[in-house]
Amino acid sequence: MEQLALFKKKRLQAAMERHNLQALIASLPENIYYLSGYESVGHRILNRTQIFSLYVPAQDKLVLVIPTAEIPTAQERFPNTEMVAFGEFFFAFPPTGAEAITEVIAARETNAGQALIKALTACGIAAGRVGLDEGRTNPQLWQSLAEAMPQVEWVPGAMVFNEARKVKHPDEVALLERAAEIAEEALLTALAKVDVDTTELDIERFYREEVSRRGADPYFGVFTIDERSALADTINTSLAVREGSIIGCDFGCVYRGYRSDLARTAVFGKSEAKVEEYYKAILVGEEKAVEGIRPGVPAEEIFHIAVNETKKAGIPHYRRHHCGHGIGLETYDFPSIAPGVQMPLEAGMVLCIETPYYEIGWGGVQVEDAVLVTEKGARYLSKSSRELIRLG
């Protein structure tokens, strides 16, 4: 894990140098985790919770700026990391043995803005360019910081994290690969339970149970039947499987912070010819796109391969706004596999390549896989068959 932390630090330092930043502040949970390894339950369940991580490369200094309520937890996990607390919270303390916690809490600030100013000042940052991750930074906080530190040039920092996170360390790749494997295993086990009258909600429950059994967090699973399989990113309902049903499966999980995002299509019983033909077409499009992946190729070139090959394979009217995306701590990392995205692919990127087709009033077919960009091309991280899944 020390090598992974060093890798992340070097990636961030390089991105900060490109943007001429003296300091960088993370606010998005995933960026805080990438920078410091810190996770917060409060951050996860309360959208208004403010937590920050400050990094100053010149001093090799990392500071957590967190609510007072989280100081004992943070001290337990990161006893050697500097911390600035803010806000009210009350703990009872023994006469001795908790000095590290009480010292930080006693020096707490009233609010997050004041705590950030204190942390920056302690690091000697009074001027220059500071990247502030806008992911969880509200306009009021941004304005208060700008007014309190007018010599600082405040610039959006999310892009810096995106640039750093787009290439993965082998340890990150291993976690992403396991996240994909768990999701696939859970899906196939869940689909084995499907019968006539099984509902979309039933399949979601089966899937979530199987993901949890494998030690991951089932953060999403969209299972749509028949005409509803034409709906993207929808909710699951009580619509039930019948003979000949299409079942669209868009699913993923979180394993030790890293995500999977995959898609498969199943049919229950005998399927109509259109399902067979259209699924074959999108599968050709996906596989040809993966074949085109190699370092140096612009992301949009892979998009055009996916769309054009799907058209040629049997859906001449096929259209898409994107055919994939990076994945990591977030479901959508850089780059987007989309028109106009000139970002060249790099070895170490992990991409989800997808070619779904949605036709309102009929249904849809979809396939999506995770691949690692290597020096020689692409390697599939998802392992299950990409063929149409047949049930019943």
Image: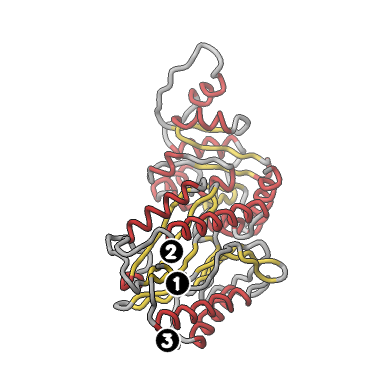
The numbered mark, 2 or 1, whose residue comes first in the sequence reads 2
Q: Residues within 10 Å of mark 2 (few under 14, many from 20)?
A: many
**Residue 273 placement (x, y as % from top left):** 40, 83
Kind of residue sitting beneath label 2: Asp
**Residue located farthest toward the left when viewing the structure as drawn:** 238
Q: Which residue is mark 3?
A: 317
Q: Are marks 2 and 1 in contact (CB under 8 Å)?
A: yes
Q: Which residue is mark 1?
A: 366
Q: Secondary structure at mark 3?
A: loop
Q: Nearer the viewer, mark 1 or mark 3?
A: 1
Q: CA distance from mark 1 to mark 3?
A: 16 Å
Foreground residue among 73 and 124: 73
**Residue 353 placement (x, y as % from top left):** 54, 70
Q: Secondary structure at mark 2?
A: strand
- Residue 156 is at least partly visible in this image: no
Q: Residue at x 38, y 63 (%)?
A: 223
- Which image quadrant is residue 232 in? bottom left
**Residue located farthest toward the top when viewing the structure as drawn:** 95
Q: Are marks 1 and 3 in contact (CB under 8 Å)?
A: no
Q: Residue at x 45, y 45 (%)?
A: 147
Q: What mark, if any, has residue 250 been given in the picture?
A: 2
Q: Residue at x 43, y 60 (%)?
A: 192
